[in-house]
Image: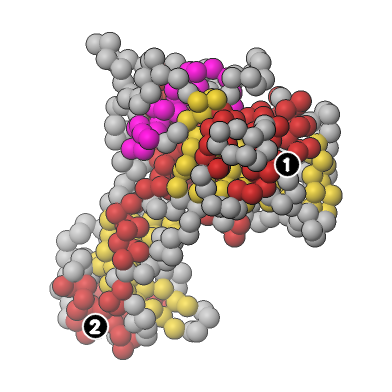
Amino acid sequence: MKKTAILLALLLMLPFTGQAQQHISDKELVSVIWAMGQMFPDGFTISIDSLRQPTRGLAVSYLATQNSFDKKSIPAVIRHAREHDGFIGGWYNPEDGKYYFDSTRIFPEDSLSAALAFARENHQHTVFDLAKGINVKSNYEQKDVRIILDTDMGSSTDDLFALMMLHRYMDMQRCKLIGVIVDRMGKANADIVDVLDNYYGHPDIPVGLETQGQESTHVWIPYHNLAYARTTDGVPMFKRSIGDNGTFMEGYKLYRKLLAAQPDRSVTIASIGLVTTLARLLESGPDEYSPLSGVELVRAKVKDIYAMGGVFGDAVEPDYNFKQAIDFSLKFFELLPREVDVVFSPGEVGDPLDYRPEQVIADLDWTDFHPIKWTYQFLNCNTGQKMWDPQAVINAVEGDDFYKLSPRGTVKLTPNGETLFTPDPNGNCRYQYPGDPVWCDTVLKYIRLMAIQH
């Protein structure tokens, strides 16, 4: 064992090359892998050819070697690894005091969908990103998550990332995006959604546009020309389904059409902007899509709403999103049925998640033509924008366990845009607490992992 320990110590000092560093017997290899488990109880992945730990890629275990624990199981894991991909992963389970070892397959970091499909085939709950040190749920149980995104696209770039995340979640088979509502007036803002839907491979998603909402809302980053970007030869950079002469359905009417077609209590709304269109939906009456009023339709079809907005805790100050269109916001809070759960994502949750412009461009260096990359290359996006909006989307798809949430209560909106929370075990409202630095780092890495997929 002394020789094995010395060999392992020397190998750990060498860079990973993918080539064998020194030939050892299978008996010594068993000892090396067992020693790795002792040294890295939180988990490791090792090449049985080079005895080095790869630093990039997406690691997924094979079902065939699942439940291989303790030293006696390692020879069979080695045989499987030799016949397949040549990697072994291991970790210590403190709950039962056993070390587990698996034959492992490693996918390129930009092949998340393939890695997740393989994980589901092999009944693995997660895919591990070796470079970022984060796990991604495979969710092979395939929950039925039906989402409508309600966005004020065209001002802050976090809306772009929120929609990108939903497309990646669809690629991962984690949700179905049944429609997008643009609550900021202006056809260009809906055209941006059309561009992203096409770019990410889901061109048939219905898009609705608010036409009677709040006038003159502030624009932080004017990327409304994104949909019309052209190359130096005058060729449109990005494809659209609706095109220059197309029209978008009125936002609240699309809401009614989509909701009427869904099973009862099956729809999740991710609201990451104004609530102008939601207020108009709640005020609406029966029409060709449903005999129900807007309030009755939402009560019947909507399960929950994840809303970016709110100021809670000791602070009593106006919320930006709700105050921008205060009359619509007051109507939304007044009419929303109490049967619909609401989870608020306050700005302070996303404040630490600073996806810097230079990092965005570097993460998208695999292509010259990308709508988000275009925005960051040709506009000043260094304006204090943080990843606020994706928090509502991630929470809506990943579930409430991903976030630390307040107890239940009710929320009242004041005419000044303040959100007043009153604890009530029977209330329909909760809000996210800010995460610690480790949580914030993990979430930002998660968004970055989604961004590099292609």
- Kindly identify the amino acid type of the residue bearing the numbered disc 1: Leu
Label 1: which secondary element: loop
Residue 342 in the image, given as x and y percentages of width and height: 68, 48
Residue 43 in the image, given as x and y percentages of width and height: 41, 69
Q: Which residue is mark 1?
A: 336
210 relative position to 26: left or right: right
In the image, residue 293 above or below residue 36: above
Of residue 55 and residue 144, the one placed in the foreground of this image is: 144
Question: Mark 2 or mark 1, which has the lower sequence index?
Answer: 2
Q: Is residue 111 visible?
A: yes
- Kindly identify the amino acid type of the residue bearing the numbered disc 2: Ala
In the image, residue 245 above or below residue 8: above
Question: Where's the N terminus, which quadrant?
Answer: bottom left
In the image, residue 34 above or below residue 40: below
Q: Which mark is residue 396?
A: none
Of residue 233 and residue 298, the one placed in the foreground of this image is: 298
Magenta residues, as a range?
Answer: 182-204
Q: Is residue 197 magenta?
A: yes
Of residue 260 and residue 46, the one placed in the foreground of this image is: 260
Q: Is residue 431 magenta?
A: no
Q: Quadrant of residue 114?
A: bottom left
Q: Which mark is residue 76?
A: 2
Q: Rounded to the nearest whole Å, what is the CA distance between mark 2 and mark 1?
A: 58 Å
Residue at (75% x, 49% y) in the render? 338
Instruction: Mark 2 vs mark 1: give the one in front.
Output: 1
